[in-house]
Image: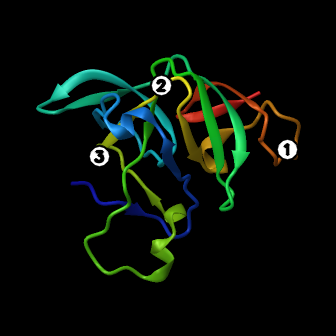
Amino acid sequence: MMTSAFQIAATHGRGYPSNVVSQRYGDHIPSVKLATDTDNGQLIAVGAWAGWDYFDEAAVTTFTGKVIAQDKNGDWLVLVTDPGDACLVYQKPLTPYETPTELLNEKTMYNKADDIVRAYVLTKFDRFTSSTENFDASALPAGTTNFVGKSVTGVANKKLVLA
């Protein structure tokens, strides 16, 4: 079992499979060995079979969606319109020791390279939440802070690309 890695000075993305079919045994949840540090709420693809019960990580080739709402905690609700080969990374934050209060915030947690994590296979009409850190908004006008109604046109460096 993987335990979460922490970086108090850093702000990491967070996410949650809010309404994802694979979360309820509608599809597989493959275990994937990460190639690089990855935040919950980022997207990866399943690569080649790598070991007894896991696959290597691959880059997402296609994915589209739409940001449909903002949660009270500031995270964005994403509706999947074409999942392509994308899978949502979500590993429940765990720690084997008592932690200081600042470590309880999920923005300090991430999944380290070489960890084996759950990769929730996405299906059309699935919904998941992801924090602002997990988006690439470089194509939007400078200063854009509201993502509701924006299209997600793909994935770059595990982040959702907004247009």
**What residue did someone put label 2 on?**
123
In primary-sequence order, the first of circles 1 and 3 is: 3
Of discs 3 and 2, which sits in the foreground?
Answer: 2
**What residue did someone put label 3 on?**
115
Secondary element under disc 2, as helix, strand or loop, is loop
* Quadrant in which residue 82 is drawn: top right
Question: Looking at the picture, which amino acid does disc 1 mark?
Answer: Thr
Along the horizontal axis of the image, is 90 left or right of 107? left
**What residue did someone put label 1 on?**
144
Residue 97 drawn at (x, y percent): 27, 77
Say if mark 1 contacts mark 3, CB within 8 Å. Answer: no
**Real-space CA distance between mark 1 and mark 3, rounded to the nearest whole angstrom:** 34 Å
**Real-space CA distance between mark 3 and mark 2, rounded to the nearest whole angstrom:** 25 Å
Along the horizontal axis of the image, is 50 left or right of 67? left
54 relative to 15, above or below? above
Label ID, residue 60? none
Of discs 2 and 1, which sits in the foreground?
Answer: 2
Q: Name the residue at 45% across, 20% down.
A: 85
131 relative to 96, above or below? above
Secondary element under disc 1, as helix, strand or loop, is loop
Of discs 1 and 3, which sits in the foreground?
Answer: 1
